[in-house]
Amino acid sequence: MSDSLLYQLSVISDQLSVISILRVSIQEIGDCFDLFSPSPHTPHPTPYTPHPTSPHPTPYTLHPTPLLPAPMSLSDPRRQKQLKTLVEKLGLSADVPVRWDLLDLALTHPSISRDKNYEQLEFVGDSVVRLVAAEVLLETYPEELVGEFAALRSMMVSDRTLAEFADRYGFERYLLVSSSTSIDRAGRISRLADAFEAVLGALYLSTQTMILVRSWLDEPLREKAAEIRRDPARQNYKDALQEWTQAKYKKLPQYLVKEINGLDQERFCAEVWLNEQKLGVGTGRSKKAAEQAAAKSAFLGVVKG
């Protein structure tokens, strides 16, 4: 069996495991905060699926009637009004079944409260965004190789990309942080990315479906995928290679970088190793660029070769 086929099987297995992760996460959050207890008589909504003959996937739309009992209101009407404004920015109507208590928690930084903050919802949201990105790629580029999906997705769900999405919808305005944390510019990207994932977790848990997520997240993810495909240099082959080595060998690749004398353009040379075998070599103007080039060489040669 080829490495490429083994890798594809491991990625499929990884995607299937997301469902079990989300189920565990739902139980953990419910046990800790008693936040999620839908009526046993409420049927789960049927997710919308793209039309098979459409050149582009049909955007998710919301059911016209409430899908769950009325969401819990917040004790602070001003905060609830703020969160409703954010939900509307996402393109969701004011009457969608959002759990406002969960959404408030998703936008509460640990600097505000050690016990009640976005960390557990971020854990759920991390799985949500990876699964949605995988589905978007499969629907948009059905003929693409799984190896390319891994490289694309690693960029689509990176902290920098998720922080861009958070900026796009103005998340920072609604994120509760301490005054000392708010002036920490170095941690801004990480904070926004974490909050973005937490919001996805809150929206998913509100209905236990992707309906409140995919209805607005598909478009920016599809735009980001197209942007990366237009500029292959932006693809994160280091992360893609790492995903492959972890799935296949449960190990991380190692990089050896040295400076090259006498070359102005390509100052550094990097080698990537795994299990005492050299997988690839690359050069670049910086150490990071050289490592990325080596990872690309290894990824294209070993995973896709």
Image (spheres, grey):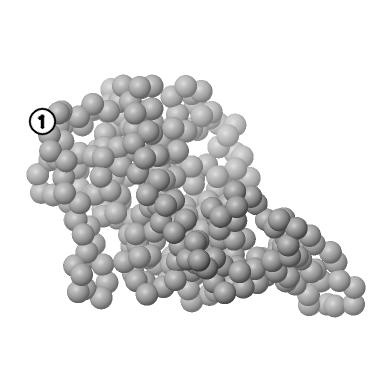
Q: Which residue is mark 1?
A: 41
Q: Nearer the viewer, residue 99 or 287?
A: 287
> On the image, which quarter does residue 23 sit in?
top left
Q: Is residue 243 left or right of residue 202?
A: right
Q: Residue shown at 71%/56% (left/top)?
A: 275
Q: Is residue 171 left or right of residue 52?
A: right
Count the labels in the image. Answer: 1
- Residue 248: x percent and y percent? 56, 55
Q: Residue shown at 15%/28% (left/top)?
A: 39
Q: Residues within 10 Å of mark 1 (few under 14, many from 20)?
A: few
> On the image, which quarter does residue 293 sit in?
bottom right
Three-letter amino acid code at disc 1? His
Q: Is residue 121 left or right of residue 193?
A: left
Q: Residue shown at 12%/38% (left/top)?
A: 43
**Against 236, is 105 above or below?**
above
Residue lying farthest to the right in this orientation: 261
Q: Secondary structure at mark 1?
A: loop
Q: Is residue 296 left or right of residue 215?
A: right
> On the image, which quarter does residue 180 sit in?
top right
- Residue 95: x percent and y percent? 16, 41
**Quadrant containing the C terminus in the rendered view:** bottom right
Residue 264 appears in the rendering:
yes
Residue 235 appears in the rendering:
no
Q: Nearer the viewer, residue 303 or 54?
A: 303
**Against 232, is 113 above or below?**
above
- Residue 160: x percent and y percent? 53, 54
Q: Nearer the viewer, residue 98 or 232?
A: 232
- Residue 276: x percent and y percent? 75, 58
Q: Residue shown at 27%/72% (left/top)?
A: 56
